[in-house]
Amino acid sequence: MTRMEKLLQTAGLTEQEGILIHKPSNMFYLSGYTGEGLIAAGCGFQAIITDFRYTEQAERQAPGFEVLMVEKGVSHAALAGRLFAKHGVRTVRYEDDEVTVRSFAAMEKAIPGVEWRSLGNAPETIRRIKDQHELDCIEEACNISCKAFDQLLGFIKPGMTEKQLQIKLDFLMLENGGDSLAFNTIVASGVNGSLPHAIPSDKKVAEGEMITFDFGAKKGGYCADMTRTISLGKPSAEMKKIYDTVLLAQQTCEDMLAPGKVCRDIDSEARRIIDGAGYAGRFGHGLGHSVGIDIHEEPRLSQMCEDVLEVNQTITVEPGIYVPGLGGVRIENTCAITENGGRTLVHAQKALLIL
Ligand SMILES: [Mn+2]
């Protein structure tokens, strides 16, 4: 069964219903196409609607899809409307979490006389379970990221700026085979470590400081996500205690990963360890999230998520402690759920590295 057929099945599509896909990550997942435009599909038909710049690319990337090119005065939606009319579509299911109010108004005008219904999370539901090719891409992206980080370690010296370290790490990820970056690299040194999503700055890294790196390469359309905190010289007793606590929470929760485990319970365990060490309120984000074409996918390891882990899902385990005025520590692995438990795809050292 193709991914598109699986989607039609998951969405429970009837013969009178059609689907519009606007979200780039869903378009890529369903067709392999990475350009602009949209997918219009239904029972017995599937088309990519795009403009002159991408028609040849769409034909190459998405064999099996009809490629329709917009012309002057005929919009993407109008072309979809013609296709739907030809196949007797009366209800259009669309991504109401992606289409803006303005483009929805334009779609209603261009495709008159049909009923509009949400597609819900049908594509994202299928995307939760990764196939072998997807797992291989994510693992390769993680391997590239680890290799880049290993090479970065020999480069880090007191007096360098966070920005210099970010540029070097980004370069190394691309040099080691990354197609692009999964997200903007975070480098946070010393007191900046208390900002979970710090932007690399011109601050110089200094002896006695910890430095947190949160980064990932993208390979074959799939993301890696990893975080390591290292110490430049001997850390203070307080920062060492924070590191040991985060490491214990990370390892304990990674060891808990298994099919059937409730996401919230794993997040609770990290909170129990961190709160118990005296850092209640200093771990203000979820423990983790799934990773795939997008850097943040479902399910999440958080207090809000009662989903149960399943085989061939990916999940990050990334506890942190953030103390304003002092600093912070986060340690993160991307893992795959197997029948036997969690399998980390990130093999960089987790024990405190003192440079
Ligand atoms: Mn993450």
Image: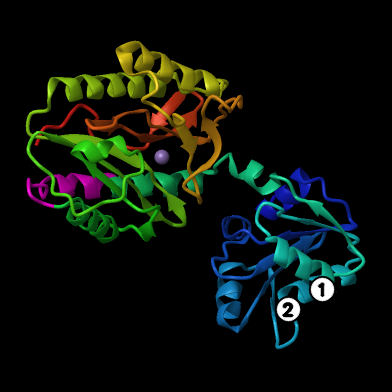
Q: Position of residue 309 (x, y in %)?
A: 56, 27
Q: How is the image coloured?
A: rainbow
Marks 1 and 2 in Cβ contact (< 8 Å): yes
Mark 1 element type: helix
The quarter holding residue 304 reads top right
Kindly identify the residue that appears in the image at 76 percent across and 70 percent down.
106
- Work out whether 259 lies above or below 105: above
Q: In this orientation, does residue 347 appear?
A: no
Q: Which residue is mark 1?
A: 110
Question: Which segment did they paint magenta?
Answer: 146-160
Label 1 vs label 2: CA separation?
A: 8 Å
Counting residues from the N terminus, which is met first, the one under dot 1 or under dot 2? 2
Q: Is residue 50 left or right of residue 178?
A: right
Q: Position of residue 270 (x, y in %)?
A: 41, 20
What number is the disc on residue 312?
Answer: none
- Work out whether 301 lies above or below 158: above
Kindly identify the residue that appears in the image at 70 percent across and 88 percent down.
72
Between 226 and 176, the one lying in front of the other is: 226
Name which residue type carries label 1: Ala
What number is the disc on residue 75?
Answer: 2
Q: Position of residue 31 (x, y in %)?
A: 62, 61
Q: Position of residue 246 (x, y in %)?
A: 30, 23
Kindly identify the residue that appears in the image at 56 percent across and 21 percent down.
262
The quarter holding residue 27 reads bottom right
